[in-house]
Image (cartoon, helix red, strand yellow):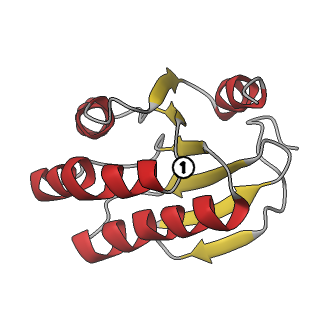
Amino acid sequence: MDPDGRNQVPDISFSNAGADVFYDEQVDCVCIELKGYLESHIYRGLLDRVIDLLKKYNTSKLLGNTSNSEVISVEDQDWSNNDWAKRAVKAGLRHNAIVLPKDIFGRLSIESVIDNAKIVKVKYFNSMAEAKDWLKKIT
């Protein structure tokens, strides 16, 4: 494990220039690591892959590393809140650990998306290690 609490070689289920999506067996959670600005079709496709992995691994936990992400468009924020969040909850999502972006505008757009998913317990963190520690405590 590296200093950020990441597996050195995760089993990447999906990867592109904008993000990695994978299952972390040690934490029993789906992880999504955003790497900057994402066009709408890429952003939505990544979040749909998260739902696929929640179902495949029968886990209720998601770790979103958004520390390097940028602003999410208002349209994608609305889609996340009104479409994706409902489907993610139906797929079993109950706990979401978010590593917040350093960029204030990215941070605000992430918080806008996450704060509207009221069924899911959400906690914000400044590091992957802290987020993983919290998720590991959830059974």
Work out which quarter of the rendered image holds the N terminus and state it: top right
Work out which quarter of the rendered image holds the C terminus and state it: top right
Q: Secondary structure at mark 1?
A: loop
| Residue 74: image location, x then y, percent | 11, 51
33 relative to 104 in the view: left or right: right
Give the residue at mark 1: 92
Which residue is at a point 32% across and 68% down the rendered structure image?
44
Which residue is at a point 71% across and 70% down the rendered structure image?
12
Where 31 falls versus 43 (above or below)? Answer: above
Question: Quadrant of the rendered structure where residue 73 is?
Answer: bottom left
| Residue 98: image location, x then y, percent | 50, 34
| Residue 81: image location, x then y, percent | 23, 47
136 relative to 22 in the view: left or right: right
Name the amino acid, label 1: Gly
Callout 1: few (<14), some (14-19), or many (20+) C-alpha neighbours within 10 Å? some
37 relative to 52 in the view: left or right: left
